[in-house]
Image: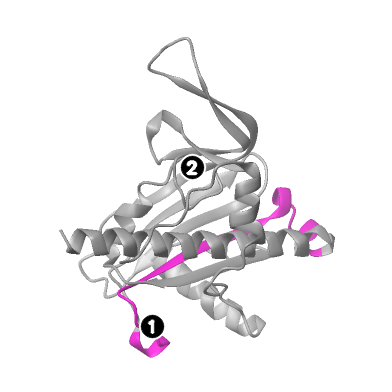
Amino acid sequence: MKQPPLKSTGILSDIRCFLLHRPELPTLVRFESPENRLAFSLRIMQRIGVRVDRYKILNIHRIGIEAPPSYVFEELLNWSGDSTCWPNHIARVVRIEDGLEKIQIKLFGRVRASSDSDQVQISGLPLFNLTARTIHRRPDPADVDNARYLLYDSSGGYPIGVFSMYVRSPIAIEGEAEHSQLFILVGFDFYGKENWSARNPLNGIWESIHDRVSANILNRFKQLCEWRFEKMQAG
């Protein structure tokens, strides 16, 4: 039987699980040339309607999951401050009005009880805001990719740009075998200044941190989905 990912218990645990831990499967999609990056950008435009070629930083991570796309997407809809696959002790996910349409990411966010017994407050420094541009819950009738996705505009701090979680069926000519392919896409410019990110040495540091965290998130999400789907199939 498969096992679920261990739940992080605090900031140090987040650092160990998402920053220091080497993920089992590599997930970063590498661009071999500017032409390769442009071709991938055009494919993104065709699928989610967003141009990402103007962003200095475009990081895409992909992992295969042995569960149907519909099931994987339903798991994505559970994204919250309680998600075991996200470093919530470092960067807590706060749903505004308990929905996915507006989300705030808070640095070292902590849950505090309020005077109203039915409400809680989340402390922490706001890092950035995510505003849903599209929550594509069902594939289009003519969509051979069987795609579903969450697409957000990012603002209020950094990154300034777009963030997406996209799941589809495998494409055989791409060598994909698992029932689902899950992508995390980030395209942005530091503080909206396109030239700043190209000059600043922090760019490389941020990208390496982002890539390690994203790879661990996807590996943990794969583990969670396959464990739950196996349990569901076993009744």
Name the residue rendered at 34%, 61% in the picture.
225
- The residue pinned by badge 2 equals 131
Residue toward you, 192 or 211:
211
Magenta stretch holds residue 207: no
* SS of the residue under disc 1: loop
- The residue pinned by badge 1 equals 176
Mark 2 Cα shell of 10 Å, populated few (<14), some (14-19), many (≥20)? some
* SS of the residue under disc 2: strand
Vertical order, 9 against 19 (above or below): above
Q: Quadrant of the N terminus?
A: bottom left
- In the picture, measured across the screen, residue 19 lies left or right of residue 152, that is right
- Counting from the top left corner in percent of width and height, residue 162 is at 55, 54
Kindly give the residue lying farthest to the front in the view shown.
1
Name the residue rendered at 70%, 50% in the picture.
192
Q: Quadrant of the C terminus?
A: bottom left
Q: Which residues are magenta?
A: 172-198
